[in-house]
Image (cartoon, coloured by chain):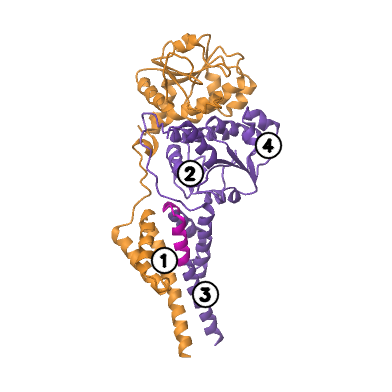
Chain colours: A orange, B purple
Amino acid sequence: MNDLHAVNTILADHLRIVLVGTQHPGNIGAAARAMKTMGLSKLVLVAPEKAPDRDTLAMAAGADDLVERASVFASLAEAVADCRWVLGATARNRRIQLEPLHPRDAAQRALVAAAAGPVALVFGRERTGLNNAELQLCHAAVHIPSDPAFSSLNLAAAVQVLSYELRCALLGDAGSAGQSRTPPPTAEVAAHAELEGLFAQLADTLDQIDFHKGRAPDSAMRKLRRLYLRANLDSADVRLLRGVLADTQRMARIAGEASVDKKIR
Amino acid sequence: MNDLHAVNTILADHLRIVLVGTQHPGNIGAAARAMKTMGLSKLVLVAPEKAPDRDTLAMAAGADDLVERASVFASLAEAVADCRWVLGATARNRRIQLEPLHPRDAAQRALVAAAAGPVALVFGRERTGLNNAELQLCHAAVHIPSDPAFSSLNLAAAVQVLSYELRCALLGDAGSAGQSRTPPPTAEVAAHAELEGLFAQLADTLDQIDFHKGRAPDSAMRKLRRLYLRANLDSADVRLLRGVLADTQRMARIAGEASVDKKIR
């Protein structure tokens, strides 16, 4: 799925971020900003300790619209009542009923579920996360693989990582590590004959600038061929390199004539 | 690679996060926190607008040790001089020479390069990012696929996403969606300073063989840099190419003397 409009529509319409019991209003704004950078727009607040305020808008930095349109509920159950799939973020491997998913897998599954109806990603309180009753309301858990020695991602950072994974999943880009987008290095790779023309001129040039100095020329040329082949040259690259070689050959010719000159004199 | 100790050792020893020209000291702390949650610990500051202060430590929230141990340099070139691979984060698809990598691919390649030596992930100023001269020092660019309509990830959020991808790559968990870790591009990539030495000599040589003939030299050099960066040169390649350039320069010198000679005669 690569149509950007379709991507944004799904992200905007079917995926909501639910923040439960947020303690600092600034974090609501920072989470909104994180969501918006990834094309998400439905923010839901469950019983925030303080209502959104000036700090919220300052941290939203342009994502104020998400904060202003945010729905507010008294309980998580109400906030996710219409959802097809509810995913709870857990800070660490707590004694929870649910085996936590990797964010990448969670994103994939969220998209599949989003085709059937609304999907919620639920984030708990800054200090204590989701309580057991709230986790019970989730269909699955997701855990960001942080360093166990320092696992305190802040709320907005966790929202950022999961929103990023959702967007990557929707764009279908697992990177080349996944499958699809193996990096076709550049535009058009030069034709075989063009490359051979370059290599022939390079070999001549090396002779003319007396590069080999009695050594076997083959070894250097083999290495240079390999090096240029790795660069996936296109036709313009070949022309550029041949231009440099042509000027080098011109210099070598002038230098050669000069030394003949000197000998004659 | 699934041994947690090994994962943390590689992250800690070979990967550094470089923040260039950071404007708000608080962002340095927030970036340190983001790094530390993912097991990264080498923070490098290049010419920050203000030195780390109380805001920095407040935002670091337990990652103060990274801030206290951070190295500070006057220029990006110095900060990455010993690096095998330098990756620059770009906010959007600017007219840059380098095709930006997906964060997932960038993380894979960073790990491969980290096996050979230090690797730097470079983040620019909050408002304006990296300038062109700084991007020129990067071997590759990485772009977080944000919504083009609202692409302003804050600095710490960008550091969080890329650090997260590094950790996922090292843990070998692409989730079940990914799986196969891309094969290592090459053996030992040349150090940053070696490549810059090559490029400087190449620029001199182009002048000496009168390659530009009045045209702006920048465009050709940009293309040549890109071409050689794609080739993943190792130290032996760099020596070979510099040998060819040295002989070219020798010819140009003889030719230059000859033409002076002729004029004198």
Q: Secondary structure at mark 2?
A: helix
> Can you tell which mark lies on residue B114?
2
Q: CA distance from mark 2 to mark 3?
A: 40 Å
To the question of a shared chain for discs 2 and 1, the answer is: no
**Vertically, is A78 above or below A257?**
above
> Can you tell which mark lies on residue B52?
4
Range of residues picked out in magenta: B229-244
Query: Pointer 1 indicates a residue of which chain?
Result: A
Query: Pointer 3 indicates a residue of which chain?
Result: B
Which quadrant of the structure image shows residue B106? top left
Query: Pointer 4 indicates a residue of which chain?
Result: B
- Residue at point 61% right, 22% down? A26
What kind of residue is marked 1?
Gly
To the question of a shared chain for discs 3 and 1, the answer is: no
To the question of a shared chain for discs 2 and 3, the answer is: yes
Q: Secondary structure at mark 1?
A: helix
Q: Is residue B230 magenta?
A: yes
Q: CA distance from mark 4 to mark 2?
A: 28 Å
Between B87 and A239, the one lying in front of the other is B87
Name the dominant secondary structure of the magenta segment.
helix
**Residue sticking out furthest to the bottom:** A265
Q: CA distance from mark 3 to mark 1?
A: 19 Å
**Discs 4, 2 touching: Cβ within 8 Å:** no
To the question of a shared chain for discs 4 and 1, the answer is: no
Q: CA distance from mark 2 to mark 1?
A: 36 Å
Q: CA distance from mark 3 to mark 4?
A: 51 Å
- Mark 1 highlights which residue? A243
